[in-house]
Image (cartoon, rainbow, N blue to C red):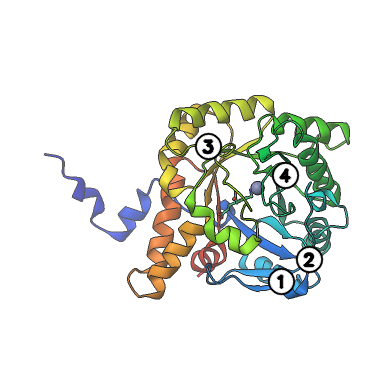
Amino acid sequence: MLRGRRLRRSTALREMLREHTLRIEDLICPLFIAEDESAAGPVPSMPGVKRHFVGRLDGVLDEIACLGLRGVILFGIPARKDACGSGASDPDGVVCRAIRAIKARLPELVVIADVCLCEYTDHGHCGLVRDGQILNDETLPALAAAAVAYARAGADIVAPSDMMDGRVAAIRAALDAAGLAETPIMAYSAKAASAYYGPFRDAAASAPGFGDRRTYQMDGANGREAMREIAADIAEGADLVIVKPALAYMDVLKEAARRFDVPMVAYNVSGEYAMVKAAAANGWIDERRVVLENLLGFKRAGAQLIISYHAPDVARWLGA
Ligand code: PBG
Ligand code: ZN
């Protein structure tokens, strides 16, 4: 008979035999940055998460430094939107200004810039639109321009989340041509058309004005297709790969980590965060234990890095 309990007899023994651990270095904290002060403030569907005014980032930056977090990923909420999302690549736009402010205060912090158009287009889609269709190839130069602008402003990594085909190659070519060959690309490669992004779209005011994202984001039913998307992005030059959402797609994460020798990133998305916070607020779950269990699950499945709105809390718990 297997006596598994022999190795669980004491805390010390259990700690010695623990196969996976969560480290503060594993965590990437998302930050919403608002160009207009009036758009700053708490996000109701994401308790504990705020939109930060770009002109007043010192407070949150000092907190991040204090907690020992190593990385952040930025999402911009611009003052104005237009049909082609031109604000995304504006060197004086909200994300470029935030990058410069962060680098001035915390030069060591790894700054990742999400690259997409949906926060900047008046129709809310991640690509350019003509006759109700989301255009692929026409969108690529706009994404590449945004990535170059963020890298020029000082971003350490650019992270395209749009799911247009060929965008990693387009961004890589544009970065290289701009003398930014050292800037890595963290590609949202396996990103499902998910209901779990709802709270994010409240936070970033980026919900599509018509239709949905199913012609570009993946069908959640397809695990094998996720491997093709990841292989294509790596072939185009992705340095790191994101699987998103994380909890309902841990099989995708695990299979990807088994197949591909690039660092894997789990994106523990807004809806996953909101569910945990709601249950915790009702006293139905032990928030700390549930969050640590979820994040440790991502590590066990093969994630090297975890993007999570829980990052500040986890940093506090790990530090204590
Ligand atoms: C923008 C983007 C989204 C998320 C990350 N980048 C929203 C979307 O695709 O609609 C979702 C993140 C989250 O839900 O936490 N393309
Ligand atoms: Zn988008």
Q: Is residue 177 above or below residue 96?
A: above
Circle 1 — which element?
Answer: helix
Circle 3 — which element?
Answer: loop
Q: Which mark is on residue 39?
A: 1
Q: Give amino acid for label 1.
A: Ala
- The Cα–Cα distance between marks 3 and 2, rounded to whole angstroms, is 31 Å
Residue at figure coordinates x 45%, y 68% from the top left: 277
Q: Which numbered disc flags the more N-terminal residue, 1 or 3? A: 1
Q: Give amino acid for label 3.
A: Met
- The Cα–Cα distance between marks 4 and 1, rounded to whole angstroms, is 25 Å
Q: Which numbered disc flags the more N-terminal residue, 3 or 4? A: 4
Residue tagged 2: 35
- The Cα–Cα distance between marks 3 and 4, rounded to whole angstroms, is 21 Å
Q: Residues within 10 Å of mark 4 (few under 14, many from 20)?
A: many
**6 displayed left or right of 133:** left
Looking at the rendered image, the quarter that the N terminus falls into is top left
**Residue 275 location, x and y as percent?**
43, 63
Circle 4 — which element?
Answer: strand
Q: Which numbered disc flags the more N-terminal residue, 4 or 1? A: 1
Cβ–Cβ under 8 Å for marks 2 and 1: yes
Residue tagged 3: 218
**303 displayed left or right of 53:** left
